Amino acid sequence: MDRYKLLIRGGKPLMGETSVFGGKNTSVAVLPATLLCDEPCVVENLPDIEDIHVMRDMLELLGCGIVYEPQERRMTIDPRGASGYTVPFQYTQRMRARYYLWGALLGRCGRCDVGYPGGCTIGNRPFEQHIKGFIALGAKVEDRGGMVYADGEMMGAEVYFDRITVGGTVNVMLAAAKARGNTTIHNAAREPHIVDLANFLNSMGAHVRGAGTDTIRIRGVEYLHSTRYSVIPDQIETGTLMIAAAATHGDVTIRGCIPTHMEALTAKLLEMGVQVTDTDDTIRVRSDSPHRAVNVKTQEYPGFPTDLQQPMSAMLTCAKGKSKVI
């Protein structure tokens, strides 16, 4: 028998106001980035989710001092005592984004022994682009039974991704932040959490330019100072709440979000006949008429997010007409 149950009585519109937590995708990139710092850092607006707890455990394993205050959505990380570069395989199975420790550890100490998510091999998608970036920066990389062994002094380089990769972009940014010389990432991902990671690095004294475009330029620095930083709101949580409000023909105001991050979803909801209005940090979603069918194609940002494909598909089952989701 399941330990927990959700009992849902449907048929009622969602009404009222709510707010969103900090972005998961940003948080799991920013927390490893604290390893690059030479002083303590404070990261705020963290979501209280399992991925954050796992990342805390892995940072502690590497030697960081951690003070985690989940009620305050805040974590203080002191990386000065971190001397480890190995994260055992059993830890790496607990969350997918632990591979950001590859870039952070290469940037910190020029070495990392970190397992693949699920024990994937180097040649399998999506990690070959990460490895390509590390090799371009001067790392030697080996795969030994699902563990990535990489070492080498990071040197600035031209990194050309064969395809857009969010994780690869993050990892190369981390590895290059303190590399010797200049790095240019071509065909970089443009997601909001790429921009937020760049802003976090720059708040510590890094020199990252172009985040949010397909070309990111990084000038390596020797020292990164302490910072206090609040991560951006979660784009996917915002989108899920918007779809839920529309699907139930409700009237919901979402506070603490970034409307410009939701433009692709907003455009589709408007096309369906949903009313969407926004201010600087709020979005109001209202729906009091039948929804029209639309076609949705997921794409890299700023296109329609892949993670919103599922709730959007559920909503479209009740729309008038034939919709296509690809």
Image (tube, helix red, strand yellow):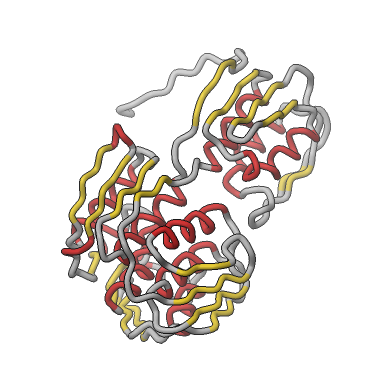
Tell me the quadrant of the picture where the N terminus can be found.
Answer: top left
Q: Nearer the viewer, residue 312 or 75?
A: 75
Residue 96 drawn at (x, y percent): 40, 56
The residue sitting at 27% across, 73% down in the picture is 113
Q: Nearer the viewer, residue 135 or 8?
A: 135
Total labels: the figure holds 0
Q: Nearer the viewer, residue 163 or 152?
A: 152
Residue 183 drawn at (x, y percent): 50, 79
Would you identify the image quadrant in which residue 103 lies? bottom left
The residue sitting at 35% across, 73% down in the picture is 107
> Is residue 29 placed above or below 247 in the rendered structure?
below
Residue 174 drawn at (x, y percent): 41, 68
In the image, taking residue 60 as reference, residue 148 lies left or right, namely right
The residue sitting at 79% across, 21% down in the picture is 290
In the image, taking residue 297 as reference, residue 133 lies left or right, namely left
Residue 72 drawn at (x, y percent): 31, 34
Would you identify the image quadrant in which residue 153 lies? bottom left
In the image, taking residue 115 as reference, residue 296 lies left or right, namely right
> Is residue 64 placed above or below 187 in the rendered structure?
above
> Is residue 250 placed above or below 189 in the rendered structure?
above
The residue sitting at 63% across, 39% down in the picture is 259
